[in-house]
Image (cartoon, rainbow, N blue to C red):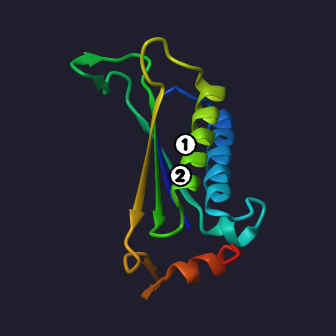
Amino acid sequence: MPLIRVTAQEGTFDKATQNKFMKEITDAVLTAEGAPPEDSGAQSLAWAYYTEQAKGDLYIGNQNIDNAPVLVRVTTPKGALNQDANNALAISINAIVNDFIGAYENRLNHWLLMDEIPATGWASNGVVFSIDDVKSAMNIPH
């Protein structure tokens, strides 16, 4: 049940490439959580937002950067990812970003931020979901 937020500089991707990028990122997160990416239940709970930042709005240090890195933020319920899953996700996201935008010379091309929501902090429709509820809805073996 991940919430994925990607921020990229405007013009980084055309719409078709953006769609493919977001699919690959989403599938990588689902895989890290142990959910089958082709499962409709898992897909229905994987929400992803793509936001473009205007050119000229990013600074690294005190330098305005024309070729901005991509920010990928993945939020999951506590217990959805363990250290091995976090490591695997970092490797997967790195490969995806490198495939789509290439490596940058002398600096990073992305940040991946992985956040966990406390066990009692994931709710919708007036219901607080436990990690077991989430795993069941996403067809993840317990």
Instruction: Tell me, yes or no, whether the two marked residues, 2 and 1, touch with CB atoms within 8 Å.
Output: yes
User: Residue 125: horizontal and vertical position, in percent?
Assistant: 47, 84
Examine the image and state in which quarter residue 119 appears: bottom left
Residue 86 has which mark?
A: 2
- In the rendered structure, which amino acid carries the disc numbered 2? Asn
Examine the image and state in which quarter residue 38 appears: bottom right
* Dot 2: element: helix
**Is 32 situated above or below 54?**
below
User: Residue 86: horizontal and vertical position, in percent?
Assistant: 53, 52
Residue plotted at (40% across, 57% down): 115
Q: Residues within 10 Å of mark 2 (few under 14, many from 20)?
A: some
User: Residue 137: horizontal and vertical position, in percent?
Assistant: 65, 79
Residue 76 has which mark?
A: none
* Dot 1: element: helix
User: Residue 120: horizontal and vertical position, in percent?
Assistant: 38, 80
- For the view shown, which residue lies furthest in the right direction? 38
**Is 54 situated above or below 80?**
above
